[in-house]
Amino acid sequence: MKKIINRITFVLAAVMLLVSCEADYIMFDSSKTFVAFPSKTSTVLEPGGQVAIPVYVVALKGSPAITVDFEFDVTDLPNAAVEGVDYTLLNDSKTLSFSKGWGYDTIWIQPIDNDIFEGNKAFNIVLTSNSQNYDFGAISSNAVTIVDDEHPLKAWIGTYSVEALSYGKPGTWDELWSVTTSSTEGDLESLTVVINTGNGGGEPFLAGIDTEEMTITIAAGTDAGNVYGYGPTGMYVGDYATIDTEAAVVGTIEADGTIKIDNLTMILTNYGFSGGLWDAFNTTWTKTGKKAISYGEASDSKVARFK
């Protein structure tokens, strides 16, 4: 009987506590209405299909219908895209309609492909006015980049699965990386490269591409970033037994996009040359498109040296 009374007392106390507390609701009123893009930038591939760029109206349910006007702006853009030449607006007009007074509508852009390399083109979509005079949100313009697919180095631009065969302990210390390569603004003879070993922390670096000699070159000591979790990682020429601190790392490229770099030595620079030798590799880079990469795990015995 005592247990039953205790339980009833506990329930009554809980009910009284809930009743005595007033709910503190977050209220939304008409002063908080606004119009905005959800993001600041959009990327359009030149040979790709139409691209949707949404615009949002945030307002109370039951708000009056609203229209939103936008314009294209290329002011101060060095390589400006031209409507009708580089892209087409698929909407009937530069006015979006929101019949419910809230929600989203979409700006549809169709890139125009050509066979001439002109570099990436850009333009801004700017929200200019709306029929209800709502404030514009934090993002009232969207910077659109049209990526030119005629880049002279396009065969070697993309995502790679890299098999890194160890010279330190062949087989035991082998690794599998993901590498992304992209064009370098204003430089048609270099790629911007990021190495990911599965530990994150890779930083962009430049690799020179010679399409006549079919070589790829990385300057001695180039920092690949914190790719192993132990600070900056410098790249040098070496076979684990020896390291050349001055020679550039040179590999070969193939027409199908394959890249091969042998004697690629990774040095954890915070530990110095003698103590910071991570490993030396013979690497083969294979294009993967947009496939996911399964990273190889560094051997426990390799990692243990730096803990």
Image (cartoon, helix red, strand yellow):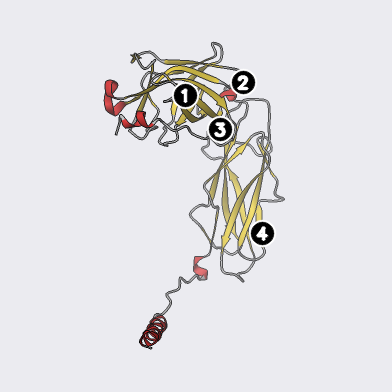
> Distance from label 1 to label 4 (Cα)?
54 Å
Mark 1: give few (<14), some (14-19) or many (20+) Cα within 10 Å: many
| In this rendering, the label closer to the viewer, 2 or 3 | 2
Instruction: Residue under label 4, please give it.
Output: 97
Q: From the viewer's perspective, is the residue at label 4 or at label 2 nearer? A: 2
Q: Amino acid at mark 2?
A: Asp
| Mark 3 element type | loop
Marks 4 and 3, the one that precedes in the sequence: 3
Q: For the residue labelled by badge 2, is the local secondary structure a helix, a strand or a loop?
A: loop
The correct choice, above or below, for 79 with respect to 6 in the image is above
Q: Are marks 3 and 1 in contact (CB under 8 Å)?
A: no
From the image, state whether disc 4 or disc 3 is nearer to you: 4
Work out whether residue 23 or residue 305 is closer to the camera in this orientation and state it: 305
- Amino acid type at circle 1 is Ala
Q: Is residue 64 above or below residue 119?
A: below
Q: CA distance from mark 2 to mark 1?
A: 19 Å
Numbered disc 4: secondary structure: strand
**Cα gap from disc 4 to disc 2, whole angstroms:** 47 Å
Q: Which mark is residue 256?
A: 2
x and y percentages locating residue 107 in the rendered image:
64, 49
Q: Distance of mark 2 from mark 3, alpha carbons?
A: 30 Å
Disc nearer the start of the sequence (3/1): 3
Q: Which residue is mark 3?
A: 79
Whole-Å distance between the Cαs marked 3 and 1? Answer: 39 Å
Labelled disc at residue 164: 1
> Which image quadrant: the C terminus?
top left
